[in-house]
Amino acid sequence: MAEKISSLRESKSARWVVLILVSFTMMCMYYLPDAMAPLQQNLQSKLHWSATDYGLFTSGYGWFNVFLLMMVFSGMILDKLGTRFTGVLAIGIMLAGAGIKYWAIAGHVDGTYELTIGSWQVLGLTPKSAVVAGLGFALFGVGSEMFGIAANKAVVRWFRGKEMALAIGLNTSTGRIGTALAMFTPQPLYNLTKDVSAPVLLSIVLLCLGLLVYLFFNVIDKRLDKEESDAGIASDEEFKFSDIADIARNRAFWYISILCVLFYSAVFPFIKFATNLIVQKFSVTDTFAGYIPALLPFSALLLTPLFGGISDKKGKGASIMILGSILLVCVHLLFAIPSLNSFPIAIGLVVVLGIAFSLVPSAMWPAIAKIIPESKLGTAYAMTFWVQNWGLMLVPLLIGWVLDKYCIIGTITRVIDGKQEQLTQYNYTIPMLIFACFGVLAIGFAYLLKAEDKKKGYGLEQPNVIE
Ligand SMILES: N[C@@H](Cc1c[nH]cn1)C(=O)NCC(=O)O
């Protein structure tokens, strides 16, 4: 009997075209989450936000994902309706969220909110602009996570048994180009337009481009469906509620998800505060300071596919996650030392953080595909992202609050756009120690994962490529 294989999936060029299309859209999507980070100080002075307000707005990314269980719904939609529909829906949601965020940051929302429940003051004179921008970011976050899950599943579908970790790594890396652009462009854009919302507008343009490109991917992916159904190859099984319970019973899955929330809590929220940290601690200008954190996604961009390729061929996935977490702790501890304040040190530390930020994702995302069957993969990625979003939501809130409560060391007066502005000065030692603690816990969970893999034989330390 003739072997049932798909010639499209077997075609290296078709696989790589698919990867380019999905990854380009990923890049467009990754611009907005970090595009406000280089303007933290400008946002604070233009919109009269405190560090707590900035933390609240930043935490918005996770609000709907966490509390409305949006990622679980996204996983269900994905497993039921497929990567093509889900991807387009996700981009539509991101566009709506980015639009709301733009409206709020462009200065159309005035006044403050105060919210008290009993004796607990939930929001104390919080600018409405921060809350509404946070709501826009929350909607964007739903689309962004939904797209991330769909993109991972699409890449796994096309690359399983081939260069899977390399492909996932390249896909994530292209996302890092979006993050790097988000670190490089906002300050020059602001200098040009004197408008803090200009980067949000650029993100809307990028998302529209991403949508066009994703529609091309849909055409090719549909051809694969047709080829597979003609060849009698079964398409993905549909989502079942019992999938959630099956995944939740897998101990290794929880180790990866907890490692994920701890690791990413020490990276993404760090990026959100990094420009300000570098201005404050290393005494460099705002524009130049924005370029230093950009080295993080840049080094990750080059190294993630390299480490993905190595783990495809050599394995050692769990060990790579341990190493990445150790590097993360070292970097944050060194950032915490007040006397280490010369700016070449900042550059070196950010590059090493970029290495950690390449090691862990390059091994982590393919590891989920090794412990969970493909039919449940959308739901599994959704559940991991849900756990991760708790960190993306709570950690910026915590850091913003800690900065205002414990880290203010004074104010300076600077002339910005011809006006004298009071800028608050912070000491970032405590926030950096908090980030380091997440890293220490991440090391522990990476070891637990390695032990579980040894016990259950998932093959996390084995190569991915089937020659
Ligand atoms: N769930 C996403 C979170 C995110 C934040 N900004 C953009 N995406 C994620 O973890 N993606 C994987 C990664 O390594 O970027």
Image (cartoon, rainbow, N blue to C red):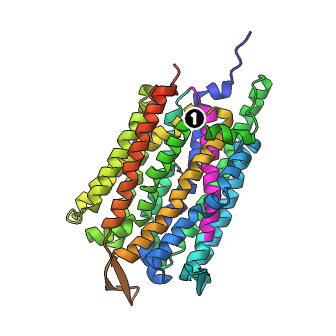
Classify residue 33 as left or right of residue 237: left
Helix, strand or loop status at disc 1: helix
* Depth order, front residue of 73/100: 73
- Residue corresponding to mark 1: 369
Q: Residue at x 51, y 57 (%)?
A: 391
Task: Give the quadrant of residue 143.
Answer: bottom right
Question: Label 1: few (<14), some or many (≥20) within 10 Å?
Answer: many
Q: Residue at x 54, y 71 (%)?
A: 57
Furthest-top residue in view?
A: 1
Residue 148 seen: yes
Furthest-bottom residue in view?
A: 419
Q: Residue at x 23, y 59 (%)?
A: 344
Mark 1 residue's CB less than 8 Å from ligand 1: no
Classify residue 360 as left or right of residue 393: left
- Residue 154 part of the magenta-drawn span: yes
Residue 187 seen: no
Residue 276, percent across and down? 37, 70
Task: Give the quadrant of residue 238.
Answer: top right
Report the quarter where the N terminus lies: top right
Range covered by the magenta-colored residues: 135-161
Q: Is residue 219 above or below residue 230?
A: below
Identity, as a three-letter code, of the amino acid under mark 1: Ala
